[in-house]
Image: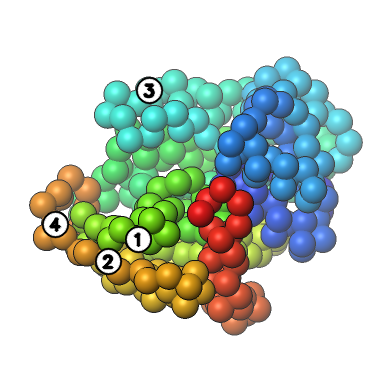
Amino acid sequence: MRILLTGGSSFTGLWFARSLAAAGHTVVAPLKTSDYSGLRGERVAALRRLVEVVEDCPFGSPSFLDLASTGSWDVLCHHAARTGDYRNPDFDVLGAVAGNTHNAINIVKAMSARGLAGVVVTGSIFEQDEGTGDTPLRAFSPYGLSKGLTWQYFRFLSQTMGFPLGKFVIPNPFGPFEEPRFCNYLIQSWFKGDVPTVRTPLYVRDNVHIDLLASAYAAFVKEVLTQKGRIKLNPSFYVESQGAFATRFATEMAFRLGVACPLTLLQQSEFGEPMVRINTDRIDSAALDWNEAAAWDAEAEFYKTGARI
């Protein structure tokens, strides 16, 4: 298939592009700009080695519409989304939705004229009404709310324009090239000889290695084209408390990194998020021929190289 994939400079976007290309598809990845640095710059450099990159082509722009109107297309994988300071309670929900959906009708029309067979939108477990857990299933944040509203818009387009639509709901991915958040904090602490703390060990979440998640994504994109109407996948793997996941991560990293990986699980005092929010569709790793040990090896190797140590 020939696939137009937005959001390729992100952590998950790079891995989705990798799995789609490995499955034999031709992937074209329009990027918002040509000026990337730091970790995102590393991801873009890796992306360029995998797929065709089109720079200075943000979603909904005239250049993006020109691209959508050129050649043939099988799938639009709309993974890009406005994030900004996604933890900020003042996050601009409506501005984000406007950006995520800008010119979408004309894009779909242009691609439909070029053979478009389906659209895949990326969702998040942080949205309203996703996964399972504490009820009501509210959005975690204004950012999560914007993701849910974006999905509702594309669902409306699918219903009124008649194209197959899939929603792939991301839980908590981790792996090489991720943003410097929880797992990065743990590893950096261990290399410094410090003992990292886990402040919210009681939250139950759904963590999945990005290599497995990306394999599930590539399989789902293919499935969307075999269905009529709208389908959704909520991929799930390591369902456990954050304290248990941190312990799992430490165990897997200790002998691979060659350093001690101690942890301190604090008595949780923050309860601003739902205690339990997880996805519902267990990934069949055997069917995807996923090597769990190799994935953990790759995680350790990523942090052992370059400036990350």
Q: Is residue 25 left or right of residue 133?
A: right
Give the quadrant of residue 240: bottom left
Residue under label 1, please give it: 193
Tell me what residue is drawn at x 53 percent, y 24 percent: 99
* Marks 4 and 2, how far apart at CA: 14 Å
Q: Nearer the viewer, residue 201 or 141?
A: 201
Residue 82 numbered mark, or none: none
Can residue 283 be seen in this snapshot? Answer: no
Residue under label 4, please give it: 268
Amino acid on which the number 1 mark rests in the picture: Gly
First along the sequence among labels 1 and 2: 1
Residue 154 image point, x, y percent: 54, 37
Q: Is residue 288 above or below residue 107?
A: below
Residue 234 image point, x, y percent: 46, 61
Image color mode: rainbow
Residue under label 2, please give it: 263
The secondary element bearing badge 4 is classed as loop
* Marks 4 and 1, how far apart at CA: 24 Å
Residue 92 numbered mark, or none: 3
* Marks 3 and 1, how far apart at CA: 40 Å
Would you say the residues marked 1 and 2 are in contact, meaning their CB atoms lie under 8 Å apart? no
* Marks 3 and 2, how far apart at CA: 36 Å
Q: Is residue 152 above or below residue 132?
A: above
Mark 3 against mark 1, which lies toward the viewer? 1
Mark 4 against mark 1, which lies toward the viewer? 1
